[in-house]
Amino acid sequence: MPGFEVFGEEEKQQALEVFDTGVLFRYEFGEQRKGVYKVREFEQAFAKYTGAAHAQAVTSGTAALKVALTALGVGIGDEVITQGFTFVATWEAILDVGAVPVFTEVDQTLNMDPTDLEKKITSKTRAIIPVHMLGAPARIVEIKAIADKYGVPVLEDTAQAPGARLNGQHLGTFGHFGTFSFDSVKTITTGEGGMVISNDEELWRNCSEYHDHGHDHAVNPGGRGGEERRFIGFNYRMMELQGAIGLAQLAKLESIVASQQKNKAILKEAASKIAGVSFRVILDEQGDSATFLSFMLPDKEQAAKVNQVLRDNKAGAINFGENSWHFYPSWEHLLGSKTLSKNGWPFDSHCKRRVIYDPEALPDSVELMNRTLVYQVPVNLSDTQRETMLAALAKAAAL
Ligand SMILES: *Cc1c(COP(=O)(O)O)cnc(C)c1O
């Protein structure tokens, strides 16, 4: 999965071009920067790669979610629906704009269950955030159709799936927005960083100005120039060094995905020999970014038994049922309304409405996640690592 595996000379060369100008900032410094605009160039290359009309670089994937929600006009008391299997960042961003996160079950895609989504739409729903977890698509076409029926915008959290496609179309380009992360463990990395993509020029302009303290970007789209201000903003600006590294990493994305697909096929073949095993539904195998291999056992006990063998043989898998960062029942700080704010914000101040999260609200997801085992697929699978993993999987198959 991680771009840090292929970090090298290309990133260094890109960064040196920024050092040569001494301009670390994306805006202004016209003369001194000698035509070097790395963040702008990264945005343009990212938009071209994904096929989106516009891209806005920001400081993180979490910031990308917040900027996109803000651009959509989501605010206090609004409801935003996402899935119960995601990284905490998705709902942190929802809470941060003052909205109420509502969680759906996940299905065999390990992503948003469209049937449950439709049940959870109310008159307060202002956005829907399906997450393309573990490198593969949510049922985005169905989700978009449901959202359209109720007139609710869709924001795709694509943090874990750059380079992934569904029927040839890049994930992140189906909804009003797609957001990406370039943190330390993501498929391409800029250290910290994020991106928002959109086909809607007005929404993109909202992102562009909001992330830059509300500076007027109208006269010089994607850059400063005007003196007007349309609304209050914030600072989520990406640095030139990050843009430079992003350009080098983006150029490697296709080869990262190709290596992962090759390595995933080797691991999948070995895992398919385990008695009773089934695999996560991948809607488009060809478009899979192949960052992870997810396989299911018939029940929680068998999954635990298989994973014990894998662990004993130095190739333990992740069970997200036991992971505290990605799955609803283990978010004790959310369930317990824990906040530094003395007035209980954001749990207590939603227009006098207190939001209560029931730990048992997603029984289908619990059943599924408890019997799912997950391997991260390395970009560079060394001979020793491959032998170890294949030997462990063979032991599990002999159970
Ligand atoms: C990593 C991640 C984010 C947040 O990205 P950061 O850059 O770390 O802020 C958001 N959503 C998902 C699904 C992620 O995996």
Image: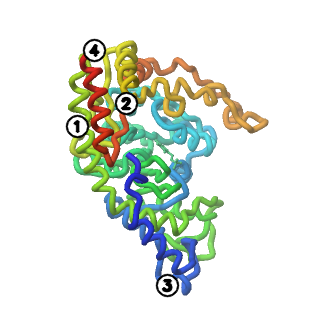
Q: In which quarter of the image is the N terminus?
A: top left
Q: List the residue tagged with mark 1.
A: 266
Q: In which quarter of the image is residue 391?
A: top left
Kind of residue at badge 3? Lys
Residue at the spot 27% in from the left edge and 49% down from the top edge: 259
**Secondary structure beneath label 3:** loop
> Which disc, if any, is residue 315?
2
Whichever of labels 2 and 3 marks the residue nearer the N terminus, that label is 3
Mark 1 crowdedness (10 Å alpha carbons): few <14, some 14-19, many ≥20: few
Residue 289: give x, y in percent of width and height.
30, 46
Q: Marks 1/2: CA distance?
A: 15 Å
Which residue is more in the foreground, 4 or 207?
4
Q: Relative to 128, is 285 on the left or the right? A: left
Nearest to the eye among marks 1 and 2: give it: 2
Answer whether labels 1 and 3 touch (C-beta < 8 Å).
no
Kind of residue at badge 2? Ala
Q: How many labels does the image show?
A: 4
Q: In which quarter of the image is residue 371?
A: top left
Q: Relative to 74, is 15 on the left or the right? A: left
Q: List the residue tagged with mark 4.
A: 399
Q: In which quarter of the image is residue 226?
A: bottom right
Kind of residue at badge 4? Leu
